Image: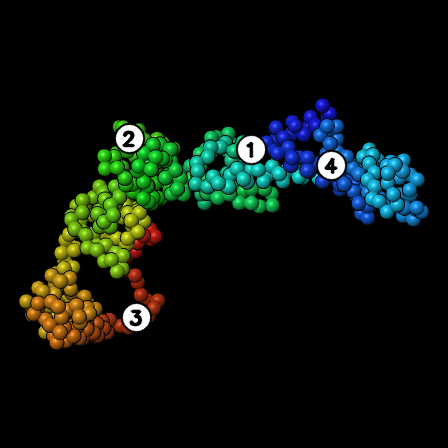
Amino acid sequence: MSELKRMIDQVAREKGLDREILINTLEEAMRSAARRKLGSKVEVDVAYNDDLGEVEVFEFKEVVEELTDPETQIDLKQALKLDPECEVGDELGVKVDTGEFGRIAAQSAKQVIIQRMKDAERDIIFEDFKDRKGEIINGIVQRFDKGAIIVNLGRTEAVLPPREQVPREGYRPGDRVRAFVLDVKRISRGPQIVLSRTHPGFIQALFELEVPEIAEGIVTVEGVAREPGSRTKIGVSSRDRDVDPVGACVGMKGSRVQAVVQELRGEKIDIISYDPDPARYVVNALAPAEISRVVVDEVNQTMEVIVADEMLSLAIGRRGQNVRLASKLTGWKIDVKSESKYGEALRDGYRSLLDVVGVGDVSADTLFQAGYGSAEALADAEPGDLAGLPGIGAERAPVLIADARRYLSDRESGQGRDQGDDEPEASASDEQTEAPPAGQAEAAPDGQDEG
């Protein structure tokens, strides 16, 4: 076996490259070297001879009676020595001695081979990893670059950017790391594999590895809400009535969930039973707090959750984390109130109804039971909806709405006069933002605290 053939086989085996790619690269490199030596006007053909284990270069020249251009022509006398059957006007392929290319041409060929091999290797790596988005991958910390962690994956490197690292997680070169393949990009330097340990998908992928029921499709992960390094809520459901999704994820004596917690270095995980009823799902998501009642506003995608006074801090969580994660998980804006605060709000709303001209005790009870618990709610009502209530009718409905709006307008103007009488006029720089009332917390699905 020739030295070149042995080298091709060895590189293809060690680098995992296709043998044909290497041969095509060699042919292209020799073609480039031949043009440097023979000139751009010369027509050349390059082919790898597998039997001889060498790259053959042929220079094509026109057979002529009288030679006028030695670069592109060959006289008939010399042509007949190479091919006794050739005639004037034929194109004759003449084998070129590649040893004549010289050092510069050989160096150029070497550079082309190296570059093409690198490109081919990059393409193979990209093809291997482009379909691995969403998977968990293992690597070794190689070095650090401006806060990013460069992870050695064996055949290539990946990057774990600062924004995808969990706070308070520290690594040193040589440490093993597991991460979520967030993206695979094709850039000029080759494929860039971006990893993450903060993405919610990392949690889901970890559970898929630990819980066979998830991998088999019996248990489904309905959603994940996460504050990396602190706490996660994961909603799960089951297609099989005999399989408890929460129990499957927890495992015997908590073995499965503890394996995930250990990988996340102590991050707390709440496994929530998914329910197609949004109100029940929210109640489950706010566990371990016990919920007294839930008031659903489907139009605005909000829920008012009422808890016992002693359960308020538990439902809200430290710095609002519990209600914030529950809101992210369920996709509903959640307003948590204590029973005492909710009762006070109901009483204030009922009193405002009684203050509206034309609303008596009986009408106030009717409106309150129908969901119009305050003058504000009455002012926003539709006449057609009110007309269907007992004792109101089509004629009285618009009158009540107009009275409620007038009452609110008078109340606002009265408050303005009271403030003007008692206090000097305030400028924008004098205004201060009041703190939210005690016994109340509100969270939106994007995780931002409000109110």
Dot label at residue 426 = 3
Q: Position of residue 131 (x, y in %)?
A: 48, 40
Quote the CA–CA distance across marks 3 and 2.
62 Å
Which residue is denoted by mark 1 in the rendering? 155
Whether residue 70 can be seen here: no
Check disc 2: other Cα within 10 Å, few if <14, some if 14-19, many if 20+.
some
- The picture places residue 225, in percent across and down from the top left corner, at 33, 45
Q: List x then y, in percent, for residue 222.
A: 31, 44
Looking at numbered disc 2 in the image, what kind of residue is underneath it?
Gly
In which quadrant is the C terminus drawn?
bottom left
Task: Tell me, yes or no, if residue 89 can be seen here.
Answer: yes
Q: Identify which residue, 310 or 225, lies in the foreground.
A: 225
Q: Which tag, 2 or 4, sits closer to the chain's start?
A: 4
> Of discs 3 and 4, which sits in the foreground?
4
Name the residue that disc number 4 marks.
47
Q: Quadrant of residue 248?
A: top left
Spot the residue most to the front: 85
Q: Earlier in the sequence, mark 3 or mark 4?
A: 4
Q: Please tell me whether mark 2 or mark 4 is closer to you in this view.
A: 4
